[in-house]
């Protein structure tokens, strides 16, 4: 993942967090239960968590593929 993409993903998460905090503040002022996120917020959080998980698994897969190629090179050089 490039530096720019990583920065943008970080900013998006930060904005999502701030959006949730603002929604909670508004809800507490209006008198709603500020501790219970809306269904949309719950889904957005689940989606973000899954995105992070997918990215982590992708990185692991790429690292494993690179390691496999390294071992293949070592094996071919030994033969």
Image (spheres, rainbow, N blue to C red):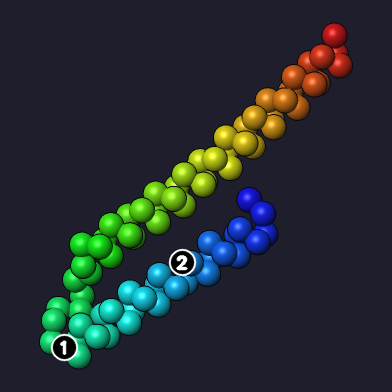
Under tag 1, what secondary structure? helix
Horizontally, is 53 left or right of 24 in the view? right
**Mark 2 = which residue?**
13
62 over 14 or under it: above or below: above
User: Callout 2: 10 Å neighbours few (<14), some, many (20+)?
Assistant: some
At 40% from the left edge and 77% from the top edge, which residue is drawn? Answer: 18
Q: Pick whichever, 6 or 68, lies toward us.
A: 6
Residue found at the far top of this picture: 79
Residue 65, image x, y percentages: 64, 30
At 20% from the left edge and 83% from the top edge, which residue is drawn? Answer: 27
56 over 77 or under it: above or below: below
User: Callout 1: 10 Å neighbours few (<14), some, many (20+)?
Assistant: few
Q: Quadrant of residue 33?
A: bottom left
At 57% from the left edge and 64% from the top edge, which residue is drawn? Answer: 8
Q: Pick whichever, 15 or 53, lies toward us.
A: 15
At 72% from the left edge and 25% from the top edge, which residue is drawn? Answer: 69
- Separation of marks 2 and 1 at Cα, in angstroms: 26 Å
Q: Quadrant of residue 35?
A: bottom left
Horizontally, is 46 left or right of 7 in the view? left
Residue 70, image x, y percentages: 75, 27
51 over 19 or under it: above or below: above
**Mark 1 = which residue?**
30
Under tag 2, what secondary structure? helix
Residue 24, image x, y percentages: 26, 80
């Amino acid at each position: 993942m490039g530096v720019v993409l990583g920065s943008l993903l970080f900013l998006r998460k930060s904005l999502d967090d701030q959006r949730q905090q603002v929604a909670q503040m508004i809800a507490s002022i209006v008198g709603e239960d500020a501790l219970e996120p809306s269904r949309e917020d719950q889904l957005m959080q689940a989606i973000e968590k899954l995105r992070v998980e997918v990215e982590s698994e992708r990185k692991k897969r790429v690292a494993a593929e690179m390691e496999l190629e390294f071992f293949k090179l070592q094996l071919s050089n030994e033969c």
